[in-house]
Structure formats: C-alpha cells, structure tokens
Image: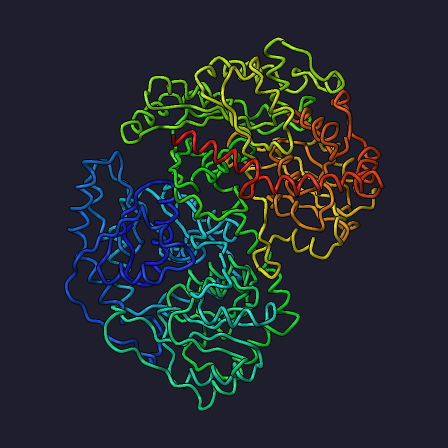
Amino acid sequence: MVPLPAQGHLNQLLQLSRLISSYDIPVHYVGTTTHNRQARLRVHGWNPLATANIHFHEFPTPSFLTPPPNPNSSNKFPSQLVPSFQATWHLREPVATLLRAFSAIARRIIVIHDVLTASVVQDVASIPNAEAYDFKTTSAFATYWYIWERAGKPYPIDAEIMKDAPSSESCFTSDSLDFIASQRDCRGFSSGHLYNACKVIETPYLDLLEKEQMSKNKKQWAIGPFNPVAISENNRSKQRHECLEWLDKQAHNSVIFVSFGTTTSLSDEQIKELAIGLEKSEQKFIWVLRDADKADVFEGEVRRAELPKGFEDRVEGKGMVVRDWAPQLEILGHPSTGGFMSHCGWNSCMESMTMGVPIAAWPMHSDQPRNTLLITKVLKLGIVVKDWARQGELVTSLMVEETVKRLMASKEGDEIRKRAAELGGAVRQSVAEAQGHLNQLLQLSRLISSYDIPVHYVGTTTHNRQARLRVHGWNPLATANIHFHELPTPSFLTPPPNPNSSNKFPSQLLPSLLATSHLREPVATLLRALSPTARRVIVIHDDLMASVVQDVTSVPNAESYNFQSISAFATYWFDWEFEGKPFPIDAEILKEAPSSESCFTSDFWDFATTQSDFREFNCGNIYNTSKVIESPYLDLLEKEETSKNKKQWAIGPFNLVAISDDKKSNQRHKSLKWLDKQAPNTVIFVSFGTTTSLSDEQIKELAIGLEKSEQKFIWVLRDADKGDVFEGEVRRAELPEGFEERLEGKGMVVRDWAPQLEILGHPSTGGFMSHCGWNSCMESITMGVPIAAWPMHSDQPRNAVLVTKVLKVGVVVKDWARQGELVTSLTVEEAVKRLMASKEGDDIRKRAAELGGAVRQSVAEGGVSRMELDSFIAHITR
C-alpha cells in the first residue's frame, strides 16, 4: 500500500489494508514516519488489533516545508501540503528495494498505490512477479468527469449535469495540477483500478468508466465503503468521546454535525458568520472547529479560531464546539444525528451515505465540488449551502441559517433524510449480507476461535467471500483469529435456478459441489504445512466434503471430525436407512418420513454416496443442535450400530441467542423499523432460504393467500442462489397487480437480503413460514417462534416432521405426499390463520416460547450445549 500523505488518502488505504488483511493476506503499508504515525493515530471505528497482519514501513524523505494553512486564500486548495506530496518522489528507491526483497520470497506481489503516488511505484514494471493497481480516492462520478475531459470528451454525456460541473482550474491550484500531471505520466503499468465506491451508489458512472476509451481495457473493482458499517457503541465506556455522551441526551435526528475535514481552514470572518447562522437556526449542532492539517501535523502550533463573544455560553445545551479530533464515523452513526454540514471530501461522503445521514454540501476544493453534484443533483441526498459559481464569496450567517433549517426542520429535509436512510441501508447490505453449510461452519469457527484457538477456514474465493458477506448478527472483529484460505477450483457452470422444476432440489448448485473435489490436493498441502507448527491439527469438515480431507490419515498429528449440517432427527433417519434399517424404531413417526428419493435428485444422491465412502477416518461427529431439542435422536445416534463407537457432540445453536437491537440506530433494516410499529406476535415472517425458487404461479398463489389471511407479514421474495452468487443477473419475480399498494401498512415485501435472526427475535414476530432448512429451524426454535412448515427438498421434509409431529412447535402448510402440486391461495390462507389467529396457534406459540427459553439457556454458562462445547474443546486440546 502506497498512500499519498494527506489524511483522506492515508485513511482510505489504511482501511483497505484492514479489509485485505482480514483475508489472512499480509499487508505492507509504506510511508514516511510522520505520515504512518498520523494514519495510525487517527484511524477509528475498528479495533487496533485488526492491524496485526499490517506491517508499517517507514522511509525517510528530505526535509520539506510545512507552512501553516492560509485561511484567507481565495482558493481553498490546501497548498501547504504540496511540498510533502513532492517529497514522496524520494520514496521511489526505497520502495523499489522493498519490492525486490519481497519478490524473492513471494509467489506474487500486489502493489496498490494512490493514483497520485504512481511515480513512487513505477519500478514495479521491472519485477516479474509484481502487479500494480491504482486506487482512486475520489468518487467514480468525479473520476469519470476528469478522465472524460482529459480524453477529449469522446462522446456526449448528461448535458443537464454537465452544465453544473465545475472546471478543474477552479478546484485546484496550478502547483497541484502540475503535480497531478506528473503522476499521470507514470501510470501506464497498472493492471487495474480500485474504487472506494459502491455499485448501489454509483453504478451508472462505474459502467461508464468501464467503456474501452475510459478504462483502456483494464479491470476495475468498486469495493467500498471501506469504513466499518456497524459501529459498536458501549454507552458505559469511560473512553467514549464527550460528544457521544452529549448526543445520547438529544432527540432522534435532531442534531446537525458540522465538520470540514482536515484540509480546510476558514477565515475568522467566515467562522463568525457560521457561528451566528448556527445560533439563529435554533437547531442543535456539534461543530468540529479546527484548522487544516499542515504537512507535518506534529510540528508547530495550531491556530485557535475565535468565536463571537459569548457564543459558547449562549448555545450551551443546544450546541457543542469540538476543537480537536472527533469520532466522525461514530457521530454520523449515532441515532441523534440527522444531518451533516460537510466539505464533501469523498471519505466524508461515503461515511455519511453509509450511515444514512443527509448532507448540507459546502465544497472547498479538489473533487469536492463534483462530489457535491453527485450528492445533491444525482442522488438527491443533500442540499447546497452555496453554488460553486460563487465560491469566492463569503457564506453569510443568513445562508447558513436557511440551509440548516431546510435540512433539519422542513418537509424537504425530512424527505431527503428518508432517501438517505434508504440508501444507507442498501449500502450497508452491499457489504454485509452462506447458505446453510457455509454459514454453520463459519459460526462454528467463531465459537471455537473464542477459546483462543486459531481457526483456518478453507474454500474457494467465491464461496469464502459469500460466507463472509452474509454472516450477520456478530461483530466482524470476531474473525480476528479466523484465517481464510482461498483455493482454486476449475471454472464451473453456474446456471440460474429453475423455478418451474417439479423437484425443488437446487440442481444449479451441483456443478459447484462437484468442483470441490479439486480442493483435495491444496487442502492436503495446507495440512502438511500446518502439521510441523502445531501439536495437533483438528480438521472439521462438512459431511459432504469428506473426499476433500481424506488425506488427513497421512498426517500423523491430525484428527478429523465430521460436521452434520442437518438435524439429528434427519441424520438418524438417513443413517438408519443407509445401514439397512438394523433395528425397529417409532412406527408412528416412520410412516410420516418421506423417502430419500423424493427429497433429492439422482445426481446429488450419487455425489452424496461418493462422500460416504470417505467417512471412516473421522474421530467423531458434531451437530448444530441441542439436547434440549433432540435428545432422543442424539441418544439413538449413539447406539453402536449407528455411531460405530465414535464420539459425538451436540453444541448448537451456533447462531447468537441474544440480539442487540438499538431502535434509534440509523443502520437498522427497514423491516425492523416496520416491526416496531406492530403489536406483539402479530406478524408472520415468510422466507424460503437461499436454495428455493418458486414459480410465477406459486408466487401469485402465495401472495393472494397472504392477502386473504388478513394477517400482517414480512415476505422475503428473492430467487435461489446460483453456484456463484456474484455472477449474472437475478430474476425479479412479479407480484399480482396492485398487491403491494393494497397491502401497504399490512405487509412488507423485501426483495433482497433481510436480517432473519433479528426479525425472528423481534417481539412483533409471531410466526415463520419456512422451507425448514436446519439453519432456519434452529434460529426460529432459538427465538421461540412457531413454524408454518413448507419443505422443498433435502433434509427439509424430515425437519418438518420433527417440528410439527415431534416437537409440536409448528403446522404443516401441505403434506409432503403432495409435493408436486401447486399450493393454492386457500391452503396458504388457512395455514396462516391456523398459526396466527387460532387457539391452536396460540398453544403452539406457547410451546415454541417455552422451548426457545430452554434452548437459549442451554448455551449459557452451565447449560447443556455449553458443556458439550467445553467437552469438545477439552477433547481436541487434550
């Protein structure tokens, strides 16, 4: 990582370093002693331990001037930083020496450099195993305009936006433009472009940047936001900043945050006008009033701006002035913050959009005027304090007052705030969304790593990314001791799901399952590499990945344990059938059990059978279940005929059992806010997981049934996953005409990811119409929510029997014997009413609540599942 020595640039590449290092890739962050120290001191919103795999290299540059900022300059570009930019040229030789040293020991060296430090890394072209990627610290919108202008405006673009676009000359100084031009001459060697941008925000401009004449056929990735999207707030911490304590006492969305970043100095006259305008607006505020950074932030005195006499006394309780560093991300993420008066630096824009906070845009220089256009004209998430055409003029107190009132105390401001909150939710989901098998082993990894045992999570790049993006309900920092290994497999087909297939098994996933056979050799290599460094290597593998880990028998200090991702009940039936039904079992339940042939396809059954040939070497079995739920079937599985004398542990539920839900948070999903307005136990949650696609006809019948039931609902309507969830388009199902309008206030349709665990844990949720995947069953049982069981394939029909016939915490939507038939709207209506509006449903809900309480208790200190986990950890660390 080679950043430019300016705070916004330093911060973005340090945040990107954190993200990349979380993939267990060592990152080397290069800079001067001064600027590395600055970057590390100011980074906030994430645990300093997250830098454990980030290595800082501090190189000398010649002394450079570090003049103070000039608050009275008509051009607000921070000219005081240019000498430090120019000094970075001297980093070229030490960086080249470092790269040559790495080249001898690494398979590949990836150099990510700020677009304005291209000259520093130009020697990458002479190193055969090195690749360089330039990082754009500006928005895709601003980058597009710059490249389009420089390319000679090769094709027409949006004329309406064009007329508002400021000239580059008005945004920079001649010295800075000369420096930028010098860097452009050194960029020909890069292999691609990285953006701290998000397709949710800037798809049109990212698409335009991919045009051949713009990208020169180089790959590009939009991987923002880099900043954390969830802020962990400990309201009792003694280390919290005073402004957060003050925000705790304010009403929701009532405070405007005023801050102009690290490169802006306001004149004394402008500071006075801003102060008077804030006071006259009569809105609550936090104002970070500090001078712009010098090139060396640790050198010399900092100007202390004067406020109007008596200002702070008059606004006491109404406003707060902060004269040093303030935790911007936490302030923007606080529920009391309802607006942000900002210079529109791209870091600040991304943080504000991520947290769903609208902006009063007051750009100063560089890309900021163009970011302002994006915010106010394109995305419509803010208002302009003053037009850029008047950038040389004083912003009067009246203009400040009117802008603050517009944003904070008007219908227009409320509508902008609503749009900002919606976009913020979409942005956060873009980085925070595995189906059952991936998710369960990642959750188990979290539990084991909490015992201070390093965990290595192995998969393909695609599926590791999928697992990590979608895991939810726990802090990403919990992965600090989890090391992800991304291994190659041959390309595989990733066909779309077939919603009209009579067999609902997700056959589209089979090519990706078959491709995993190619993981055997790299996994064996990894095991042999870990073996000399560890007293014991423990391999926990999915039951369907036995062939991949078969070489564990050749590693003398390795042991393997088979993980069952399905219920003990379903496992028991499958094993019992497979072993030739060696002893009599409950005949009443047996007649309810569906045949294996009806639950799978023949292709998948062949795959599963090949895996069973490789299970003999494992030392025991692990289940994501609890003895509170499935004790009889766990006992049966311990019978010698079934277990073959191998140990077993039931250590579920893996999912969190207590959900922290801050109702004032700007980051909450819209479904949770809607649930807040409903009465307890009145909403049925409808979701069929990640492997189910319903036909258009079935979707229509389900919609009509929900409407006719007259019960409130949240329905997650999304297509099943493909083998590669990041490839291709996703089908958008059509609902009956006028359905959503008629049901407004009564129901909610969610077409993307939804926080299932949080929805199930919400007091307004009283039922769950589910496919009965085991993850979903465990989450619902844990939260004490009864199930309307609509199984589709695999273990789901047997889980449905467990839920409805054995545990009696659910009702059946339709019998499995009729699985090929359409479920009519009448069937849906009757099932929903049975569960949600009948004495039978109330009795089931009571049993579900009691079972949920017992399950949650089982993972507490001294609980049966906690003791099982402790037993397993004691066994593998013996």
Which quadrant holds residue 379?
bottom right
In the image, residue 389 sits, relative to residue 728, either above or below, namely below
Residue closest to the eye, 262 or 126: 262
Q: Nearer the viewer, residue 163 or 170?
A: 170
For the point 78% across and 49% down, the residue is 743
Question: Which quadrant, please, contains the C terminus?
Answer: top left
Q: Position of residue 3 (x, y in %)?
A: 29, 55
Q: What residue is rendered at 51% in x and 47% in y? A: 474
Q: Residue furthest bottom?
A: 309
* Residue 694 higher or lower than 584, as above or below: below
Residue 693: x and y in percent read 65, 31
Q: Position of residue 136 (x, y in %)?
A: 37, 53
Q: Nearer the viewer, residue 455 or 512?
A: 455
Q: Position of residue 595 (x, y in %)?
A: 68, 16
Q: Residue at x 72, y 17 (%)?
A: 586
- Residue 329 position (above or below residue 740): below
In the image, residue 843 above or below residue 551: below
Q: Is residue 261 left or right of residue 635?
A: left
Q: Is residue 704 visible?
A: no
Which of the 4 image quadrants contains residue 587?
top right
Which of the 4 image quadrants contains residue 573?
top right
Q: Residue at x 72, y 36 (%)?
A: 787
Colour setting: rainbow
- State whether residue 299 appears in this view: yes
Count of numbered tags: 0
